[in-house]
Image (cartoon, grey):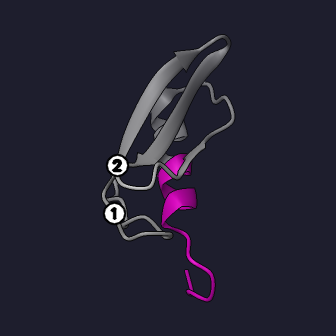
Amino acid sequence: MKELKPCPFCGGEAFIEPYKARKGYEASIQCNSCLAGMSTITYDDEKTALKEVIEAWNRRAGEQE
């Protein structure tokens, strides 16, 4: 699993939490400092939900992939 980048708003440390949803798995990330956060849509497996939310959180404007 990729490491989380610091919060894009305040630079704080974030935590990630996968969870079972009604029809699959979702994952959310939240900053411990400013409480900025995001969640995924529902995926069939937990691993995909984690991968997608980490990639979205780590994406920064102007950076090349």
Residue with the most extreme front position: 34
Residue with the most extreme top position: 22
Tell me where residue 55 appears, x and y as whole percent.
Answer: 52, 59
**Rendered image: mark on residue 12:** 1
Give, as a three-letter code, the residue at label 2.
Asn
- Residue 34 colored in magenta in the image: no
Q: Is residue 4 left or right of residue 40?
A: left
Q: Report which quarter residue 10 is drawn in.
A: bottom left
Q: Tally the marks.
A: 2
Mark closer to the chain start, 2 or 1: 1
Tell me where residue 19 appears, x and y as whole percent.
Answer: 47, 22
Tell me where residue 64 appears, x and y as whole percent.
Answer: 57, 87
Tell me where residue 9 appears, x and y as whole percent.
Answer: 50, 69
- Mark 2 secondary-structure assignment: loop
The one nearer the camera, 7 or 22, is 7
13 shown above or below 29 = below
Q: Report which quarter residue 41 is drawn in.
A: top right
- Residue 53 colored in magenta in the image: yes
**Label 2: few (<14), some (14–19) or many (≥20) C-alpha neighbours in 10 Å:** few
Residue lying at 46% horizontally and 45% vertically, measured from the top left: 29
37 shown above or below 64 = above
Residue lying at 54% horizontally and 37% vertically, measured from the top left: 49
Residue tagged 2:
32
**Mark 2 touches mark 1? (CB < 8 Å):** yes
Give, as a three-letter code, the residue at label 1.
Gly
The one nearer the camera, 53 or 43, is 53
- Mark 1 secondary-structure assignment: loop
The residues bearing labels 2 and 1 have C-alpha atoms spaced at a distance of 7 Å
Residue lying at 56% horizontally and 76% vertically, measured from the top left: 60
47 shown above or below 32 = above
Magenta part of the protein: which range?
52-65
